[in-house]
Amino acid sequence: MTKNITLAIDDDLLDKARVLAAMRRTSVNEMVRGFLQHEVDRESTQAGRAEVWGRLFEAVDKDVDSREPRSAGEGRLFDREEFYGEVMRERRLL
């Protein structure tokens, strides 16, 4: 079921949106609906990723806590912040 909403928008912006909608062979209504859907989907995706990362970090932390400390020759384990930073740098997000 669809609902009607009312938006307050500047006349100049509305004129430009109408021109853009015409160029795209759609309506301002469809553009607004598409924008809102995109934002909701993006937020849901980010929340899902945050949940996955949270579970991963919990598992890593649990595993690190249960391990015996490594000797100097075996190298050291990453902590959560180092692991996250390394992954983000690899993906060029930091």
Image: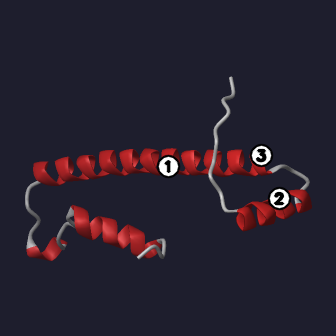
User: Can you identify the residue that label 1 sits on?
Assistant: 43
Question: In the image, which is nearer the foreground, mark 1 or mark 2?
Answer: 2
81 to 30, vertically: above or below: below
First in sequence: mark 1 or mark 3?
Answer: 3
Q: Residue 66, how many percent across, how many down? A: 12, 48
Asked whether, in this view, residue 65 is left or right of residue 21, the answer is left
User: Can you identify the residue that label 3 sits on?
Assistant: 30
First in sequence: mark 2 or mark 3?
Answer: 2
State the CA–CA distance, disc 1 to disc 3.
20 Å
Q: Which mark is residue 18?
A: 2
Asked whether, in this view, residue 20 is left or right of residue 54, the answer is right
State the CA–CA distance, disc 2 to disc 3.
11 Å
Number of marks present in the image shown: 3
Residue nearest the observer in this picture, 90 or 3? 3
Mark 1 touches mark 2? (CB < 8 Å): no
First in sequence: mark 1 or mark 2?
Answer: 2
**SS at mark 2?**
helix
Q: Amino acid at mark 1?
A: Glu
Residue nearest the observer in this picture, 42 or 86? 42
Asked whether, in this view, residue 36 is left or right of residue 15, the answer is left
Q: Residue at x 35, y 72 (%)?
A: 86
Q: Residue at x 79, y 66 (%)?
A: 16
Q: Amino acid at mark 3?
A: Glu
Q: Residue at x 66, y 29 (%)?
A: 3
87 to 53, vertically: above or below: below
